[in-house]
Image (cartoon, grey):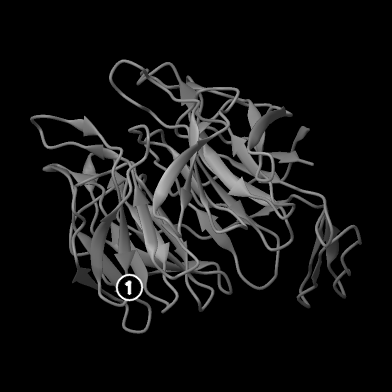
Amino acid sequence: MFHMLAGLRVVLSCGLFVCSCEGNGLRTLTTHDSGGIGGATMFATGGTGTGAAAATTGPTGGATSSGKTTGTTGTTGTTVPQGVFIPAGNMTVAREGHTATLLPNGKVLIAGGLDYDRLLASAELYDPATGTFTATGSITMLREVCTATSLPNGKVLIAGGVNRGGSLASAELYDPATGTFTVSGSMSVARDGHTATLLPNGKVLVAGGYNDNGINNTFLASAELYDPTAGTFTVTGSMSVARDGHTATLLPNGKVLIAGGDGGGGGGSLASAELYDTGGGTFTATGSMSVARWSHTATLLPNGMVLIAGGQGFGNSVPPVGFASAELYDTGGGTFTATGSMSVARCNHTATLLPNGMELIAGGFSSTEELASAELYQ
């Protein structure tokens, strides 16, 4: 069930929202974002060691607790209810279609994107400790709708995307130690709207997407693996269906769930899903979603299930037709079942699973406007 939340600060120009939640680490999942920036949503899950959390603020620092307990009030502070959003600083440049990646030092790398009709090479770092953004090195290639993946060595892989010249095959690495981007090996196929998933063996699975070369634009079924040690991409098995705007989620068993997307060819949105086997390098079909969708989010929950939320359908509709529905994928049974719907339909949003089991969904677009709403699923 989703419940509307109060206490949201909306930064429409920059699209950043920060949840009052503390802990070690923050996992960010970015999606194809072409619909604008706006609201934020929090998702709470049950299960051992997770659940509602209360955040405490005050001049003396306060504390945040996890589970069903109440946070400790600061000396002169007040207890803030669970699911509350607190102000965050503005980025140095307004942008959409960018990436946001948590670094080992706790900062967040924001890179590339689009400022209205101007492609951006700039990048910046968000410091949660100070709530401020500062500029860092610029990417080597103008790009939006690319992927950004944090690697085991601490660097960030930026791959693909699109600019005025069409889809990109190039990739680059951001080094937090030096604050610079350097060119890495290129993918075998130029693509945007793809996914990039860090595998247990340290490699990155890049799957699907769209190849816009200005002549024979193609939806892609191909996939490839990035090897951080060699700095190269190699082809792996192809998906059974070409798709972009899909999701890719690493499951506890080491497989990767590929769900939904836009299949093109007049078929529009896809309900199908498939699993990538990291051992055999192959894709096999699994159960289908109850709703065909793309530009949705998919997040692995602490209970092992995957939450699929929102998205859009009916092909490449302009403006997009957003969904409020959500469903859960059972990794054990390989099936999808409907769960409670969001109170607002949204697509092109992002989803972040926080250490306390709550999920932050930020931004999004309905069929008519950017969204500034927030809601809690529990």
Residue 80 occupies which quadrant of the picture? Answer: bottom right
Instruction: Give amino acid for label 1.
Output: Pro
Name, please, the residue furthest toward the right. 69
Residue 319 occupies which quadrant of the picture? Answer: top left
- 192 horizontally vs 91: left or right: left
Check disc 1 and report its element: helix, strand or loop. loop
Q: Nearer the viewer, residue 179 or 78?
A: 179
- Give the residue displayed 32% in from the left and 59% down from the top: 225
Name, please, the residue furthest toward the bottom. 177
- Give the residue displayed 85% in from the left and 60% down from the top: 67
Q: Is residue 349 visible?
A: yes
Name, please, the residue furthest toward the left. 215
From this view, report whether residue 154 is shown above or below residue 93.
below
Quarter of the image for the N terminus: give it: top right
From this view, report whether residue 331 is shown above or below residue 353.
above
Rendering coords of residue 256 (x, y %): 50, 50
Rendering coords of residue 297 (x, y %): 53, 40
From this view, report whether residue 299 is shown above or below residue 197.
above
Quarter of the image for the C terminus: give it: top right
Q: Nearer the viewer, residue 88 or 203?
A: 203
- 81 horizontally vs 373: left or right: right
Q: Would you call the spot at circle 1 few (<14 residues within 10 Å), some (14-19), or many (20 or more)?
A: some
Rendering coords of residue 203 (x, y %): 39, 66
Q: How many marks?
A: 1
Rendering coords of residue 7 (x, y %): 71, 46
Q: Which residue is mark 1?
A: 228
- 70 horizontally vs 272: left or right: right
Q: Is residue 348 visible?
A: no
- 221 horizontally vs 211: left or right: right
From this view, report whether residue 12 is shown above or below residue 214.
below
